[in-house]
Image (spheres, coloured by chain):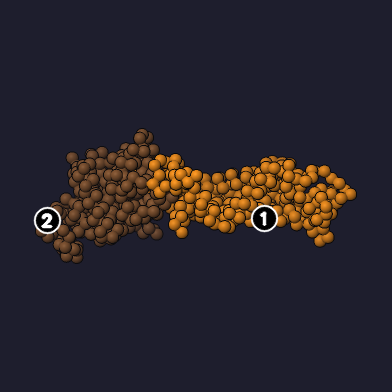
Chain colours: A brown, B orange
Amino acid sequence: MSLIEIDNLSVTFRAQGRLVHAVEGVSLKVEECESYGLVGESGSGKSTILRAICGLAPVTGGTIRIAGQPLPSPRGPGFAAQVQMVFQDPYASLHPRHTIDRTLSEPLAIHGLRDSDARVVQALVDVGLPPGFRFRYPHQLSGGQRQRVAIARALMLQPKILLLDEPTSALDASVQAEVLNLLNRLRAERGLTFLMVSHDLSVIDHMCDRILVMQHGKAVEELARADLAAARMTTSYARSLFEASADRMLAAP
Amino acid sequence: MTTLRAWLSDPNPASRRQARLGQLWLAALRIRRNRLAMAGLVIVGLLLVVALLAPWIAPHDPFVQNLGNRLKPPGTPGYLLGTDDFGRDILSRIIHGARITLYIIALVAVTAPVLGLLVGTVSGYFGGWIDAVLMRLTDIFLAFPRLILALALVAVLGPGIENAVLAIALTAWPPYARIARAETLTVRNSDYIAAIRLQGASAPRIIAGHVVPMCLPSVIIRVTLDMAGVILIAAGLGFLGLGVQPPLPEWGLMISSGRKFLFEQWWVATMPGLAIFIVSLGFNLLGDGLRDVLDPRSASR
């Protein structure tokens, strides 16, 4: 049994009376402790899949199961302790009027967990931030530091699954590598399962065991990391996507 | 003293209490640097002191009439701001009136914006039919002329300060609801609201802890700008015999009684008018400063 099973998922938005099929009949399975990537150009529906899992997008067909259980709607507190998400833009995902302390301790308060002082300090240390940052506001931090706070927040409830929505695309290149390495370290330490969205194949190559290439809301091709490294694609779209970013992938260590 | 200051301005506080006190300290520093806000704070502080000490600092009894002394001009010995048509000292009446004005302002300021915030954020956050029902209700209240609606309410409930305040509050909340709803609509789809929802937070927690702080600054500005209007509506109700009743020295009531002598004895209406003007100005300046202080991002500017 896979940890995340998505079967024939469809998401349809209604925009100005027109139906927009953001995701059509996508199926995927993510094993426990695996890192699974969703790749595609913008508008291909990859972020929508993450939002559908979180209950933030209207699912019109198919099923999503976590650890074999279909998800309740609305998602309950049990879901929050199991699945968390890191958003794309760290400038928009932290409340501008809450201190880091409040942002990190709020999930503990919601779920009635004690010992929030020690847990908040530990969470900051775990993501490589000095504990002295605890009472700062988001505007006093850099983009990379904010994204570390967002990762710490996502891990406060010790979930098994982390949904990563382009976690580094808003950061510059050197910070990007730091955050990706942090995520890899946390995954190894805690046995996390990642479902990661990116349009950048070099990021996906660095992070993921398997990837699913998407286009226009449909799954195009599933590849293992070895296939990606050896450029063994069967579809022309996956190949063109690979060739567009191949030079940067080869340059990366 | 220096150790206390160092403790308060420590950039890396050790506890929540220290962090909170440190933020208050920074806010106090910020408001002290803002000269206009300080001016507003001084005016409002003076109003508070005057209201508190009214019986001791007023030179005369505000109710004792002396028809031999009626309509004395300002500067008459013993009557600094002159006397009104019953020979009562205007300065003493203004000083005692500060209490009534403050009472009305305080009651309106804690009821109308709270009700407006509640309606606006709930309506904006949930959307759908809740939004439709609450906003049409707001439209109905907005469609009535404010003074007429207050009149109707007071006519039903009977005249008096409390009923006047209730009438003003019930007619003053729709603009706050509209502002709060507009702000809520801009934040409800933001990532930080999605993030806290994903953490399993309930709707009341999200609205109170995450949406309201984003709406507060614009509502506070609006409240301070409305304060002058509140004093004037209270005065209008008093003038029509439905608010504060004579002989209570309410400032608006004093203006309306001085209206009869406006051309010959200008000071009877002008002095309480000046008092309203100064207090309104103080609230406006303070509100502007408070907005800067309430926004932690402005600390860097």
Chain on which label 2 sits: A
Residue indicated by mark 1? B278
| A113 displayed left or right of B298 | left
| Residue nearer the viewer, A223 or B12 | B12
Whether residue B139 is visible to the viewer of this picture, yes or no, is no
Residue under numbered circle 2: A227
Q: Position of residue A145 (x, y in %)?
A: 32, 52
**How far is mark 1 from mark 2, CA to CA?**
77 Å
Q: Is residue B283 left or right of residue A156?
A: right
- Residue at point 79% right, 43% down? B61
- Report the side of B276 relative to A64 (left or right): right
Under mark 1, the amino acid is: Ile
- Residue B265: image location, x then y, percent: 82, 58
Element on which disc 1 rests: helix
In the depicted structure, whether residue A158 falls above or below residue A138: above
Q: Secondary structure at mark 2?
A: helix
Circle 1: is it few (<14), some (14-19), or many (20+) Cα within 10 Å?
A: some
Tags 1 and 2 touching, CB below 8 Å: no
- What residue is drawn where x is 19% and y is 59%? A202
Subunit of mark 1? Answer: B
Q: Camera-side residue: A251 or B173?
A: A251
Q: Nearer the viewer, residue B48 or B1?
A: B1
Most extreme residue toward the right is B68
Q: Position of residue A147 (x, y in %)?
A: 31, 52
Residue B264: image x %, image y %? 83, 60
User: What is the total number of numbered labels drawn onto the structure image?
Assistant: 2
Labels 1 and 2 within one chain:
no
Packing grade of label 2 (10 A; few <14, some 14-19, many >=20) is few
The amino acid type of the residue labelled 2 equals: Asp
Q: Residue furthest front?
A: B2
Residue name at image x 39 percent, y 38 percent: A109
Q: Is residue B94 visible?
A: yes
